[in-house]
Image: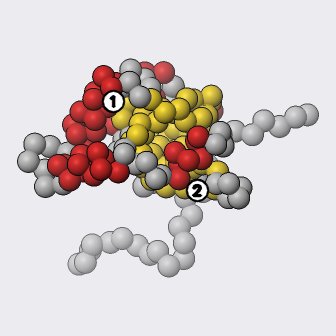
Amino acid sequence: MAVTQITASMLAPLRGDKRWAYIERQKTIRVVTIDEDGSPYLSPLWFVVDEQRIFLPLDAGGRHAKNAEAGRPFSALVDTGDEFTTVAGVRMLGTLKATDDPTLIERLSEKVFDKYFHVGHPFAEGYMEFGNFAGRRWLEIIVDKMIGWDQRETSTSASYEARVLPSHIGDRLLPGS
């Protein structure tokens, strides 16, 4: 008899509009591309979503852009959660494609400002100016596969409970009880 491995995306899937809403609210995407020597290059990046398309602002010398131009594999992860029942994420596999549409680039730049800065923010102008100086480019994530999970969707954690506490944990009686 074959055994099916149960995964978080099977128990608490994150799909459709919920997945896109989750992605749009997050601030960081962890991107992996493969360098020329075959080693993974991993870094956390900013990103924006426009019409259910994900874009990365990358400066011209960025290794991810060079790896994308060489046609090397790409994967990414957007994730949150500090406890088992708050873990959520979306994993993506695909490729990166540069965009040079000036209207789209202007809209994406506005979205970056709205997402990461505010009027009067002390670093907004510097970030925008550096992008112009460094030849910032916009790469779109072309998703071949997207897998999402959200443990917050489950009312109880998807695990067995033994209710046995470690020996170093004693009574939690209040002083004077």
**Residue under numbered circle 2:** 41
Judged by depth in the image, the label closer to the viewer, 1 or 2, is 1
In the image, is 119 to the left or to the right of 99?
left
In the image, is 164 to the left or to the right of 61?
right
8 w.r.t. 81: above or below: above
Looking at the picture, tell me which residue is in the foreground, 86 or 24. 24
**Residue under numbered circle 1:** 105
| Amino acid on which the number 2 mark rests in the picture | Tyr
Q: In the orientation shown, which residue stands out farthest toward the left?
A: 120
| Amino acid on which the number 1 mark rests in the picture | Ile
Locate residue 3, reporting x and y percent. 83, 37
Residue in the picture at 20% in, 53% down:
126
Quadrant of the drawing holding the C terminus: bottom left
Residue in the picture at 64% in, 42% down:
70
Residue 17 visible here = yes
Locate residue 125, reporting x and y percent. 17, 49
Q: Say whether marks 1 and 2 touch (CB < 8 Å).
A: no
Q: CA distance from mark 1 to mark 2?
A: 25 Å
107 w.r.t. 63: above or below: above
- Judging from the image, what secondary structure is the residue with disc 2 in? strand
